[in-house]
Amino acid sequence: MWRIALSWLLLFFHPFWAQATVIDSLKAELSIVQSPKEKAEILFDLGKSYWQERNYKEAESMLQQAVEAFKVAESPMGVNDAYFILGRCYFEQAKYALAISIFTRAKDYALAHQQDKNAANQYNAIGITNKSIGKYPEAVLAFQGALKIYNRLHFEEGMAAAYHNLGLVYKEMSDLDTALVHFQYALDLRKEKGSNREVGRYLQSIANIYREQQAHEKAIAYAEKAIDRFEQAKDTLGLINAYGVVGLVQMDVKKFAQAQKTLESVLAMSIPFKYNLANTYFSLGKVNQGLNKHHKALAFFQKALNSSKFSESGNIQSDIHLAQSESYEALGQDHQALTAYKAYITQRDSLEGQNIKQQIKELDAKYQSELKDNKISLLAKDNQLIKRSRAIMLAVLLIGLLLGLVGWLSVRTKRLQTVQRNLELEQRLLRAQIKPHFLFNALTAIQSFTLKNGIEEGAVYFASFSKLMRSILESSNNELVTIKDELESIEHYLKLEKLRHGNLFDYKIDCDPHLNQEELLIPPMLIQPFLENSIKHGFTRLTDSGEIKITIKKEGNEIQFCIEDNGVGISQSPVSNDANHKSRSMKITQDRLKMLNKKLKKSMKFTVEDLSLSGSGTQGTLVRFRLPLIGLEES
């Protein structure tokens, strides 16, 4: 069975060699074959033969049967080929909606059966059909779908064809720069490995763009390169088109004598190609218009009009009538000019009307098909409706109840998610309030220390500061960190503060050895504000050295985290005596723990005690945190 190579540039030029004897022979063979695959292949060959004869009704019937037969025979390739010819049958009858439907069905079938290259070919067919009816966005999406598959398969020939098709769409949309980029992509992919015919086509498309951009020298250069390729490939149709570009450029620059010579050589080649023959006659007529040889121009226009009946597009006919009107007017034959212009208007309106009628016809056909299917379905089900009505009502009721339950659960879930998000945002805000305050003080300390002690000693401060910043940044996005990480941060911080204040105080950190520092978690930066208060406010009036003692131990199911200093105590500190000062440390910590308790459903709390009021004769401040045991797995 013939395999179909997707080459849509030759869409309108299929041969008409199928004879009645061939069809009769295939029909006779169909009546005796037993193999499902052989039957499918004969049905396909019959459909293809009818299509070549433009007997679309018989072709459609045979090809539809072939599709089903290939499915039974489990031949995805056969299904693809039959779908493709069936789609072309609809395309050539201007049944574009049906053509797109068939190509889409074929594409989906190919993808489902891992026939990627066939799926890409069907994408191309969908794109070309959409391009033909002016649905350019849909065409671009289809060609991009083909390109994506070809790229995945590393199939350069297919990639180049897809780029070229995209360029043709952008050219139709008058986006010449984008079209040129895509044509150049296609050429770059294939100029070394591609066939002369393929490369010539890309060169010619580039020449067309340069012609429309009025880059005449480049247009001629690329057209001549295309001519060279087409001559090597002995591709007459390609030569006609490439020489046509040269002739049109010569017309654009008013070199009418050269254009006439070029187009006359094209005319000799165009005889077998009736559609191209009309274009060539028309171009020669325009050349003679430029030479003010209007009688000769009119003769060519009439030949173009006679040849245009073989065209499947009426656009050229309207162009011919308009050109005739211009020549008649130049000759002073006003009556003939008016008649030709009326013919132009009539043809133009007819084309627009045909397009509208065709769209209405397609929509009506689709509607009638759906209506017919619905009527059949309703007749088949009519006798069952009464018996099923109660079951349906019950099902509807149950579904309604179920939907109501699902809706209630959805609303409740969204509400809980909103609350959770709010808690997280508030928690991040509270942690963010700590960091600017602390960073400002730390940077101020760096500046002060460096100015006082010099750059070399300041470098030591910077090194310690960088370690502290790294530990803070690593934990900045975490609500909990390990005890080990938190103690390292505290160690860095206290070293910096001790260095800054010139040994104003000493510190000691004592951690219960039974606590697993790498597994248990606590909130980060929790005690830092209280350490800062001890250093800044607690030791300012001391005559002796200050001391900070940090102890961490396990008590039952809790971790007790204590910070004790020997400062002047809260009641005697400068903070408590400043009526305008509001310490943010306690408020921020309270709010942080409140948010964490809500989110984690835990109990975290702290107390602050002024030791000078305890009656023990000691002075200082004791801050005690009681935190739950939270392991990495639970987090």
Image (tube, rainbow, N blue to C red):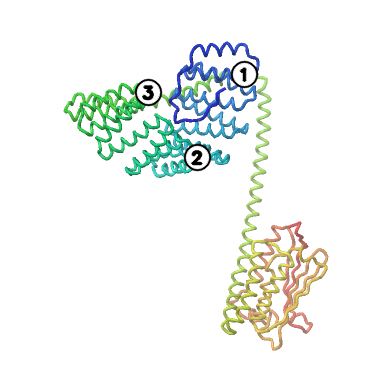
Q: Is residue 527 above or below residue 310?
A: below
Can residue 289 be seen? yes
- Mark 3 or 2: the one toward you: 2
Q: Is residue 292 above or below residue 305?
A: below
Tell me which corner region of the image, top left, top right, bottom left or bottom right, holds residue 492: bottom right
Viewer-nearest residue: 54 or 367: 54
Q: Residues within 10 Å of mark 3 (few under 14, many from 20)?
A: few
Distance (Cα) linking label 3 and label 1: 37 Å
Mark carried by residue 449: none
Could you tell me residue 399's position as x and y percent? Answer: 66, 33
User: Which residue is disc 3 drawn over?
Assistant: 272
Could you tell me residue 477's position as x and y percent? Answer: 64, 61
Could you tell me residue 292's position as x and y percent? Answer: 20, 32
User: Which residue is disc 1 drawn over?
Assistant: 38
Tell me which corner region of the image, top left, top right, bottom left or bottom right, holds residue 344: top left
- Mark 3 or 1: the one toward you: 3
Q: Residue at x 82, y 70 (%)?
A: 513
User: Which residue is disc 2 drawn over?
Assistant: 193
Query: Of marks 2 and 1, which one's residue comes earlier in the chain?
Result: 1
Label pair 2/1, CB-CB below 8 angstroms: no
Distance (Cα) linking label 3 and label 2: 30 Å
Q: Residues within 10 Å of mark 2 (few under 14, many from 20)?
A: few
Q: Is residue 347 above or below residue 516?
A: above
Q: Residues within 10 Å of mark 1 (few under 14, many from 20)?
A: some
Q: Is residue 82 left or right of residue 218?
A: right
Asked which secondary structure carries label 3, the reply is loop
Which part of the image, by quadrant, shows the C terminus?
bottom right
Distance (Cα) linking label 2 and label 1: 37 Å
The amino acid type of the residue labelled 2 equals: Lys
Asked which secondary structure carries label 2, the reply is loop
The amino acid type of the residue labelled 3 equals: Pro
